[in-house]
Image (cartoon, rainbow, N blue to C red):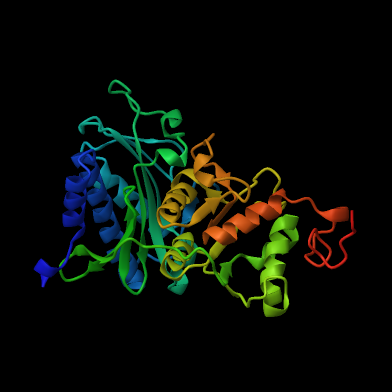
Amino acid sequence: MLADRTTLTRFLIEERRRYPSMCGDLNSLILNVALACKAIARRVSYGALDGVLGAEASTNVQGETQQRLDVIANDLFLRANEWGGMVAGLVSEELEAPHPIPARFSRGKYLLAFDPLDGSSNIDVNVSVGSIFSILRAPDLAGADPTEKAFLQPGTEQVCAGYAIYGPSTMLVLTVGTGVHGFTLDPQLGEFVLTRQQIRIPPTATEFAINASNRRFWEPAVRRYVDECLAGRAGPRGTDFNMRGVASLVAEAHRILTRGGVFLYPRDSEDPARPGRLRLLYEANPVALLVEQAGGRASTGRDRLLKVVPTGLHQRVPFIFGAADEVGRIETYHREPLDGGLDAPLYGTRGLFRVSA
């Protein structure tokens, strides 16, 4: 019965009662984001029946080919959030510059950054995709539209972050700074219902995800970590690891929040002008906040990701997150010197052929 279940609306109201400093405008903004996610879920679920599959002739600001659903999802996010008077401006993976609020609508106290359809390159093979969002406080702009600079805040400044995953069921996972909670969309009610509370990531893991085809471009610390995992029980870790990969950040994050593990999209040398692949503002930062709120760790490989100060709307960063102990180990490997420039675990600092001091 509905009376026995907690909807997203009820959850937000109860959180506001527990934390009076929470603003009603924030609750309204989250519900507008949820509305956009419901609309996107419907379009995704219909797929070819609704004529939404396939690529467009256009590219986004990153030069990537846009899928038809990228464009649709971006428009749904804008339409759902620009009218309510809660946001001063919006930025998206699909837009080069901040989206101004139309003059007929009032401006609010928050900024919304989002990836409307993460993993959209997988949509034609029916793999889970999702939407990622981050909410920041807007600076006092005296009624003016926010410039790019207003959005360039470190991830520690986020007041809310979350994602929707469109899979066998549609789930909304979010944090308002009081832990991580998951809501499943009841298609008959049209409501997100609380199904997971205070999600926690175990500190250790036996599962990792990485695109192994990029091995030749990895830094030595990453090759060392992966080689140790692949060595299994006979290797230095003394444990068998499983390797997974979905090529969808939302799906990777959801798996780690569900059953633990670690995800690596590290810095590599393939393109020296682009040290990372994932976007800081609307991909890495919101996922990092969720991970930390769930007891995990999120890093660039060297430092806490949420401390990175953005320099551009579409800035890319290396991103490693998940089980705290595993991410900490990878950071340690980046700090440890390598003997003689050798990068394989067998010959590295802890290797069999280490030279005595």
Please state the horizontal and vertical placement of residue 263, each as a whole percent of the image: 55, 62
Instruction: Give the camera-side residue of 121 and 164.
Output: 164
Residue plotted at (19% across, 63% down) = 191
How many numbered circles are shown? 0
Question: Where does the image place residue 169, in percent across and percent down from the top left?
Answer: 31, 72
Residue 123 relative to residue 298: left or right: left
Left or right of 278 on screen, residue 71: left
Classify residue 328 as left or right of residue 49.
right
The residue that appears at 29% across and 57% down in the rendered structure is 37
Residue 16: give x, y in percent of width and height. 19, 46
Residue farthest front in this picture: 357
Q: Confirm whether residue 93 shows in the render.
A: no
Q: Where 102 falls versus 8 (above or below)?
A: above
Q: Quadrant of residue 211?
A: bottom right
**Residue at horizontal 64 percent and vertical 57 percent from the top:** 330
Asked whether residue 278 appears in the rendered view, the answer is yes
Q: Is residue 65 above or below residue 103?
A: below
Residue shown at 31% from the left, 45% from the top: 78
Quadrant in the picture for the N terminus? bottom left
Pinpoint residue 88: horizontal percent, then vertical percent.
30, 33
- Give the quarter of the image for residue 149: top left
Left or right: where 347 falls relative to 198? right
